[in-house]
Image (cartoon, grey):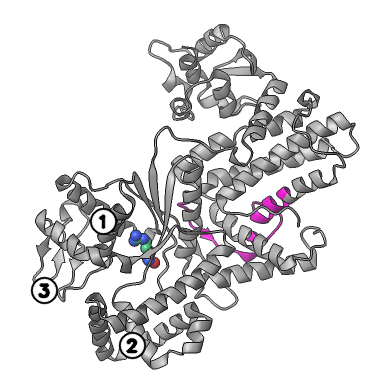
Amino acid sequence: MATQLFKSAIAKPLSKLTQFSENHIIRALQAPKAQLQHQFGLPVPRLLPQGQKNAVAYSQELAGKFESNTYIEKATAVGPFLQFDVRPSEYIRATLNQVVKEKEKYGHHTLPEKKTVIIDYSSPNIAKPFHAGHLRSTILGNFIKRIHDANGYQTIGINYLGDWGKQYGLLAIGFDMFGQEAELEKDPIHHLYEVYVKINALAKDDPEIDKRANAYFKKMEQGDQAALAQWKRFRELSIDSYKHIYKRLNIDFDYFSGESQTEPFIPKVYNMLNQFGLIETTDDGASIVNLEAYKLGKPIIQRADGTSLYMTRDLASIMLRRQLFGDFDKVVYVVGTEQELYLKQLFKISELIQQHDPSWPTDLYHANFGRVLGMSTRKGTVVFLQDILDTAQEHMLENIKNGNQFKMDALDDLDSVADKLGASAVLVQDMVAKRLKNYQFSWDRMTSARGYTGVYLQYTHARLCGIERNAGIPFDMKADLSLLNEKEAFELALTISQLPDITHNACQAMDPCILVQYLFKLAHVTSQANNVLRVKGADTKTAEARLLLFWAAKTTLANGLHLLGIDPLSRM
Ligand code: ARG
């Protein structure tokens, strides 16, 4: 089969072949994508089939065998590489037709069978700061959910709040001493945090408070009505204000769950682990699962006083999720590196459970991420999501007012535009580099209109919308594309055609940087095309064709931005 042969020769040198993309070759050869993709990036010699020693001779042999097709006219051997001559107008036509057909679904895929993925992300702790780890979990988790949706998965987004445990006993005691109803109603997140800081300071010098907190939490675990009623209020008010803030980031969870919701399953966890013989009791009366054989320590499952821990609740949450959602194929925990060992323990315990209960899910995945360095807002280093978004918005307003970076249209909804630009800036800064890398938080860099920023991507989108607004001719889906003869038009169509591969790869890797980097490339190629392919002033037929090309670029960019959780702006 021709594709089998060709993938060897085009593997590594692909990037060196002028004007060709993986997508292009794949389409031209109609090869099964997955099969080809994992071969890319390997040096030719390693891919030479058995019995072939000479890459130069081999590429000549392949060139000789190549038969022209709709997109590729001919193949020529160049040293160990194969060079393809494409038929640009066919390629442009095929690409734009696909965008026209699929519109806001362009770049999306379907799956042959139903697959459900649970994404556990954001998950802040009530009454505690929303730290950089939560920011990244929120942004990356939202992307991981959206990219799975776009790849045909059924997704369930869960905010697994830290809303249970001894610290809520402490918080309740603190609220009795320092809490103010009016403040709680006005700004629950900040107020509960204030109370929590004060009571923690007291508890440091007074062991009595710690004991009371433990006793209070025990009351909660035993279902004490009054204790639970107050805790429930704290929780609900906090969720309401979180929802408000998440909205500024276009984030909507399917479930606000949390550690507290696992409570009914906690006894079942103890029973199950006991029944499977996985529990050991320590000298001081705690129950542990011994994972020393796997070099994963001895995580505690139950304290000596009978109360549960974070680990117990994560195991219980798997039970809860099975009850709520039936079978699911994968759970993605979007959590920072600090919890790497913890999650390894959780996953290992799941494997051990599965040996006794084959239906227990073990396709659990840690979407780990690097640290954010130097994150602070004008209020200080203890940050809340709201303060981050407010500060980003302020920076954008300043930039706009100083006019120092880009010319804006006169807009009457400046505050809302600045808010969206600010959010785009924060989001892209977080997703521009590999997920696992640490990065330095920088207001100036992220809010700049130059460089690899969200502001630049928004600017490109708004400009593309401007081309349509100012064209002076009606938009025609049936424009004559044979009028797109310039190499810039071909480059742009070629780049547009890569989105489906990019969304596929970004989902496999669960790494948004693949998409972000691609969108920057698209923005650059768009800007080059825009310099040459004028719409205004061209004859009507040519203008129509160019307009369609830019519309496709805009649609591609917008679809990509949506996957990142960014609302594309049509004016700025
Ligand atoms: N609330 C936790 C924290 O702030 C993160 C929860 C992550 N999800 C989970 N299922 N453990 O550290």
Residues at discs 3 and 2 in contact (Cβ within 8 Å): no
Q: Amino acid at mark 2?
A: Ile
Q: Residues within 10 Å of mark 2 (few under 14, many from 20)?
A: many
* Residue 306 in picture, x, y percent from top left: 16, 73
Q: Residue at x 57, y 28 (%)?
A: 23
- Residue 231's label in the rendered image is none
- Residue 173's label in the rendered image is 2
Disc on the earlier residue, 1 or 3: 3
Determine whether the residue tagged by mark 1 lies in a helix, strand or loop. helix
Whether residue 119 is visible to the viewer of this picture, yes or no, is: yes
* Residue 63 in picture, x, y percent from top left: 57, 10
Q: Residue at x 43, y 17 (%)?
A: 48
Of the pair 464 and 380, the residue shown nearer to us: 464
* Residue 168 in picture, x, y percent from top left: 33, 78
As drawn, is 509 to the left or to the right of 461? left
Q: Residue at x 43, y 89 (%)?
A: 179
As drawn, is 553 to the left or to the right of 159? right
- In the displayed structure, would residue 532 be above or below residue 402? above
Give the foreground label among 1 and 2. Answer: 1
Q: Amino acid at mark 1?
A: Met
Residues at discs 1 and 3 in contact (Cβ within 8 Å): no
Disc on the earlier residue, 3 or 2: 2
Q: Residue at x 41, y 78 (%)?
A: 234
Q: Amino acid at mark 3?
A: Asp
- Separation of marks 1 and 3 at Cα, in angstroms: 28 Å
- Separation of marks 3 and 2 at Cα, in angstroms: 28 Å
Magenta segment, which residues?
A: 435-461
Q: Which residue is mark 1?
A: 319
- Residue 284's label in the rendered image is 3
